[in-house]
Every structure is written in structure tokens, then in C-alpha cells.
Amino acid sequence: MAPDHGDPDLIRSGPNNDIPEELPGAVQHGAIHGGIVVYRIHFTSHDLARTRPAEVPMPLSELSMAARVLQDRSQSRLLDTWRRRSRAQLSARARMALSLIPPVGWSPTFLTPAQAGGPEELLEQVRATPRKLIRAEMAVIAENQPVPAWARRLSDDAELREELYDGLGHLYTQLMSSHWTQIIGQFTADRTVRVRQFLNGGVERLLCQVNPQWVRWNPPVLEIRNRIEHDLHLEGQGIVLVPSLFATRSIVADDTHAQSQPTVTYPVAHDQPLRQLFLLTAKPTTSSSAVALSALLGNTRAAVLNAIAEHPGCSTKELAALTGIAPPSASEHATVLREAGLISTVRHRNTALHSPTSLGIVLLNTADSPSCWTSSTEPWK
């Protein structure tokens, strides 16, 4: 949503770059490949060198995906139970935040940035958004789609902003917290696949296989099925590939206001179409061994140990993002686990890197691994 950009439909910093179920019959100035409009990302050798899978989930970006699915009635009716349950629990302030993240269209990037980190840390960053940026983003959105009347006062009304930020935190709690274990499990499984693809065939194989239904690697261009035609020249930035439990299509986000790489979000495990629906409609269950582990260590510390075992060599900041806690809390729990002999910590420059010990692995081996769920879409034709 760069105010000075010539194309108001381009996802630069906030719009949902989904494709309608039925493409329009006529697309002006659109590149059509068998009826498909294409968003093209142009790579140089420097871009290929910097392209990578995301190291940890991006909580607020995932929240944006979940908020869209919550409102998108075109998705399967099997999601209606989850929708009703989730909507019934939303406060008035959470509904404020939801109203700025429509199922299709623009949403302000400052509200759900595509960044890694713990939810608390990211929500604090959102609260610190400059008024000038809020005013610019909301102005572009208002030019392209209807917005709530109160949203036009957002940059000038501090009390209104606090209500919105509180609502965003509540929305996160209701939509994401109960699914965080599944999100981490899916993310970890997908990243393992991506790393293997990279080791076996380099970045080009990674781009070829990341999401064949919606993404095609046509060297040196990555083509993504889209609502609009656009050419994004990375100019040495590369991209970050972000798997998402709630995404139903590949989405490009290029935030011109943040000093971060563009991201391409895609559905995890797209070859298992019914499992995500099962996750969202079924009641969560917990194994007796996992209960015992939580009783021994406490829920948060057990989650920290599990995250370290699944991501050996992770930093404290990465650990915080993986478990959804603040970095100081992650450091404190890691210290206790280290003193108990369940993890080991080494330092690389100024970064602490945590790995499980054999004792920690033995303890975790009694707990079940999280299952994987996902969604699917039609293949690229």
C-alpha cells in the first residue's frame, strides 16, 4: 500500500493478493496464461542467493490469513462450526480489528506485519506505528474499497488506536492461541521439506516445488497466479518463503515501509486437502503423556523444551517466536532447562543457541508429536 505507487491494486504493503474462485471474463492489461493472471517476481543471481525458507512462523501474518478465512463464506461449509464458535467469542474491539482485514481486498500492513517474533513483541511494535504511516496506509485503502467510518479518524485519535490494538490482541488470542501447536508442527514439517529440497537441488528446486498449484518457476521469473498482472524486480533482496496453515493460495507481500524482504506465503502440505478442515472443526485433544510432561515442567516450559528439540540450534529470539512468548521469558525458561540438564547452550558471537541434550530427548520421547493438517487448491493448468 505504498501511497506513491501508480497501481492501486498492487499488493505492496497490505492487500490480500488472493484470486477469486472465478476469474473475470475480461482483464485489462493482464497477462493471461490459460485464463490465469500472473504476478511475476524477477530474480537476479543476488536474489537467488538471498532467497530462503522462513526460519520461524510469522504470528500476525498468520493471524491475517485466519481472519480472512473466518469471514470468507466461499470456503468450505465444514468451517462453519469453527466460524460460529470463533465469532461468538469475539469482543467488540476484536471485531474492530477484524473489520480492517476483509476476506478479499486491502488490509493495513502495520496491523499484521509479515515479521517473525513473539506475539507480545509484535503487538508492541504495532502499537508503536507512526501516525504518518497509519494515515498514509488508510488513505490508500479508503481510495480502493469501503472502510468503517471510524477508521478514517484512526491516525488522529489515540484512544481509538488503543481500542484497535487491544482488539487485535484479543483477535490473536481467539483465532491463533488454540492452534499454535498445530501451526508450529505444520511449519516445522514444511521447513524440513524445503531444506531437503534445497540440499538436493538448490534454490531453483525450492522455487519449482514450493507450491505447484499456484507458483511456477520460469527462470529467472517466479510466476504466481493472481488477480492482477504485476512485475516485481527484487533488486538483490531475494524473498522469504512462508508456509501458512490458514492460507488457501499463494500471496505476495512487499512492504515498502519496512526494511524486510518480500514474502511469498503459501499453504502448507497442499496435497492433504481435508486435514486443515479437521483441525478447525474438531475439538483439540491432548495425549496423557503430554499432560504428564506439562505437569512436570509446566505448560510453557514443556513447550519451550519441545520447540528446542524440534529446532536444535535455535536462538533465544527464535525460541520466543516458536513458543509465542517474550524473549526474556524464553531466556528464563531456557536457563532453567539448561540447569536441569535438559538442554545445552552455546554462544555464537552475541547469540545463544539452544539444543536438547540426550536427557531432554528421552523425556520428550514419551510425548506424542503434533499431527499435520492442511489445505489444497486446484493445480496450475
Image: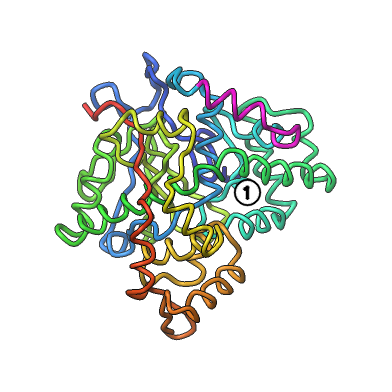
Residue 164 position by quadrant = top right
Q: For mark 1, what is the residue? A: 110
Residue 62 place in picture, x, y as percent = 50, 44
The residue under the point 50% across, 37% down is: 65
Q: Is residue 132 magenta?
A: no
Q: Which residues are magenta?
A: 80-94
Q: Residue furthest top?
A: 25
In the picture, which quadrant includes the C terminus?
top left
In the rendered view, tell whether residue 35 sits above or below residue 167: above
Q: Is residue 124 left or right of residue 339?
A: right
In the picture, which quadrant includes the N terminus?
top right
Q: Is residue 223 left or right of residue 250?
A: left
The residue under the point 41% across, 79% down is: 344
Q: Which sits in the foreground, 49 or 42?
A: 49
In the rendered view, tell whether residue 250 sits above or below residue 317: above
Residue 234 position by quadrant = bottom left
Residue 84 place in picture, x, y as percent = 59, 23
Q: Main secondary structure of the magenta part?
A: helix
| SS state under label 1 | loop
The residue under the point 18% across, 62% down is: 199
Q: Is residue 287 left or right of residue 217?
A: right
Q: Which sits in the foreground, 101 or 350?
A: 350
